[in-house]
Image: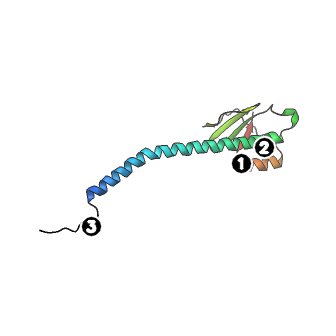
């Protein structure tokens, strides 16, 4: 009787392992992409809040809150209308905001660090 020295894996075992890995990847990739999108939206919202604080600090007391602003970053935008920052939305920003606000050079420098573009109506 011959005794076989079995070393390594058979082709069937390798194919089964590859199939299991493919199934796991098919299930996990959509989950990871939704987590990444939520993270990007959260980062944009945070940047919009920081930019809003910077802009409102620069705004003079007479016009405080009377200007509507549009904040845009990385394909997301949010509108500030009077007293509230709207929801962060992904997509093309409204074209009704076409002007660049007049801000001090310090404010413009601070805004450029956030990566947010600010527009007014």
Residue 5 badge: none
In the rendered image, which residue does mark 1 sit on?
Answer: 114
- Residues 4 and 83: in front is 4
For label 3, the crowd category at 10 Å Cα-Cα, with few meaning under 14, some 14 to 19 and many 20 or more, is few
Mark-to-mark CA distance, 2 and 3: 67 Å
Front one among 115 and 50? 50
The residue indicated by pointer 2 is: 54
Q: Earlier in the sequence, mark 3 or mark 1?
A: 3
Looking at the image, which residue is at 73% across and 32% down? 84
Quadrant of the image containing the N terminus:
bottom left
Q: How far from the left and from the top, in percent, is residue 105?
A: 82, 49
The quarter holding residue 39 reads top right
Q: Is residue 27 left or right of residue 68?
A: left
Q: Residue at x 63, y 42 (%)?
A: 42
In the rendered image of this protein, does residue 73 appear above or below residue 85?
below
Q: Which residue, given by chain and number where applicable, does mark 3 sit on?
A: 7
Furthest residue to the left? 1
Instruction: Determine whether, in the image, residue 18 is placed left or right of residue 107.
Output: left
Q: Position of residue 8 (x, y in %)?
A: 29, 65
What secondary structure is marked by label 3? loop
């Amino acid at each position: 009787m011959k005794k076989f020295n079995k070393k390594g894996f058979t082709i069937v075992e390798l194919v089964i392992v590859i199939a299991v890995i493919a199934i796991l990847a098919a299930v996990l990739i959509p989950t990871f992409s939704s987590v990444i999108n939520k993270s990007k939206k959260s980062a944009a919202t945070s940047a919009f809040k920081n930019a809003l604080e910077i802009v409102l600090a620069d705004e003079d007391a007479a016009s405080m809150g009377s200007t509507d602003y549009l904040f845009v970053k990385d394909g997301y935008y949010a509108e500030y209308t009077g007293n509230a920052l709207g929801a962060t939305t992904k997509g093309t920003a409204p074209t009704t905001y076409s002007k660049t606000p007049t801000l001090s050079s310090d404010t413009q420098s601070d805004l450029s660090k956030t990566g947010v573009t600010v527009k007014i109506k």
